Amino acid sequence: MLDKKIKNRSAKICIIGLGYVGLPLAVEFAKKGFRVFGIDTDRERIKNVNSGRNYIRDIDSKEFKHLSLRKRIIATDDYSVLKEVDVIIICVPTPLRKTMIPDISYIIKATNMISKYLRKGQLVILESTTYPGTTREVVLPALERKGLRVGKDFYLAFSPERVDPANKVYKVRNTPKIVGGMTDKCNRFAESVYSRIVEKVVPVSSPEIAEMVKLLENTFRMVNIALVNEVALMCNRLNLNVWEVIDGAATKPFGFMPFYPGPGLGGHCIPVDPHYLSWKMRKLNFRSKFIDLATEINSRMPEFVIEKMRSLLKKKSKSLKNSKILVLGVTYKANVSDMRESPALDILKLLLARGTKVYFNDPYVSKVSVNGKILSSVSLKNISRYDCVLVVSPHKIYNFNDIVSKAKLVFDTRNAIKGVSSSKVISL
Ligand SMILES: NC(=O)c1ccc[n+]([C@@H]2O[C@H](COP(=O)([O-])OP(=O)(O)OC[C@H]3O[C@@H](n4cnc5c(N)ncnc54)[C@H](O)[C@@H]3O)[C@@H](O)[C@H]2O)c1
């Protein structure tokens, strides 16, 4: 019955959590003709969805408006809509607490609400990144609380999201999707539903494998970024250009994959997800040394940026204290508006603590709060008044030729100004 409904697209889909992950997913299902409901706790987001106002940069706003106005996507904060849907996909946040311990309270809240309305024949999929065991140990018991049995009465799977914001090539449709069901039937249904919107679905043998796949992917990135950040520190001591070293190594057609250094880790995933794994392993008396070491090296990068800038300014007989610095781009990476875990925040904090007069410009961010101080994005009109322009998020929108020609000094932490040859530009 469920399989038939999925195939003929009469299955109704509900996405819980309409953020960077949930909203694009809702759009993909709606585009394929499914009736989509979205549940969110954020009233502003609900209002935006229902009035056709897109708030996620990777979604085509015109297409979104069209789907919303035709009521192909309807948002609500009323969980009772779950009674009438066939597939429920959970895309709520999984942050870390201040103590670096996983905060799965959003998953628990969403699951408890699903449990209240769960009925026979429904498929529930968890997409939020989490530690191995969450689907079986946390979600399943809550869903079986009222006597329904998985694989028989309802279906449950974990399927990690791999979205890469601002990636122009890989979107939901052409990024292979891993699914790990609690039973074979759960796997089959989850595979069937995703294959309506994704070119390739890859079933694995259990939810734990699917959970661990995602953590391997993000730990792989975190550790390799740490390695190359340490290589950047080494090259700095050796007076070598790390970017040239990486470009050279990347000409090897096998056994090497380039990663690039930067001012520090950012975003909702890479600095966070590996700690879900190390927390789980600590509970099993296992210390994940690579994650610990990578965290230590990556978190040193903002300090390194400040130290290097201090020595660049010193050559111009300036100190950090009597300098004006313009931070260019404060989001966690270029061409996104997401500030979560952005290294720019650490850099702004460190500069303010040293008494530097700090300013920032970002076309996607109007205000930033640093230690209770609110900074507003400044215009790029008077670039020559700053002692140094510090490039943190090199958005494509920036005209670097113009910026370099007006600036006194540019410290490029991302090697973004490759094309502009000028002695004023110093890279990490
Ligand atoms: N952003 C990414 O690039 C990315 C990539 C891969 C995986 N992920 C993972 O996907 C998950 C979601 O991330 P995101 O970036 O979309 O987060 P987000 O903060 O952008 O969106 C989450 C949404 O869930 C809503 N929400 C919170 N609690 C809720 C509840 N109880 N009921 C209904 N809605 C609720 C929030 O209001 C918000 O709109 C996380 O586990 C994250 O690690 C994110």
Image: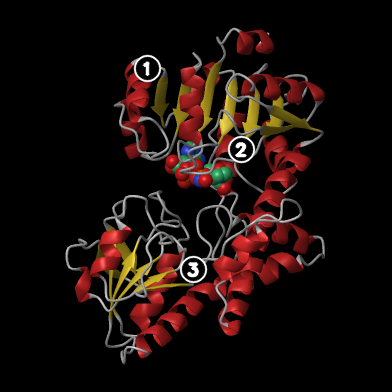
Residue named by callout 1: 71
* Image height of 166 relative to 425, above or below: above
The amino acid type, in three-letter code, at marker 3 is Pro
Q: Residue furthest front?
A: 421
In the rendered structure, which disc, 1 or 3, sits on the residue that comes first in sequence?
Answer: 1
**Residue shown at 34% from the left, 79% from the top:** 352
Mark 1 neighbour density, 10 Å: few (under 14) some (14–19) many (20 or more):
some
Could you tell me residue 175's position as x and y percent?
61, 34
Mark 2 beta carbon near ligand 1 (under 8 Å):
yes
The quarter holding residue 242 reads bottom right
Label 3 element class: loop
Could you tell me residue 104's position as x and y percent?
60, 49
> In the rendered image, is residue 2 in sight?
yes
Residue named by callout 2: 127
Indicate which disc residue 27 carries: none
Label 3, label 2: how many angstroms apart (C-alpha)?
29 Å
Q: Is residue 179 left or right of residue 18?
A: right
Mark 3 beta carbon near ligand 1 (under 8 Å):
no
Indicate which disc residue 263 carries: 3
Mark 2 neighbour density, 10 Å: few (under 14) some (14–19) many (20 or more):
many
Looking at the rendered image, the disc whose residue lies closer to the viewer, 1 or 3, is 3
Which quarter shows the N terminus?
top right
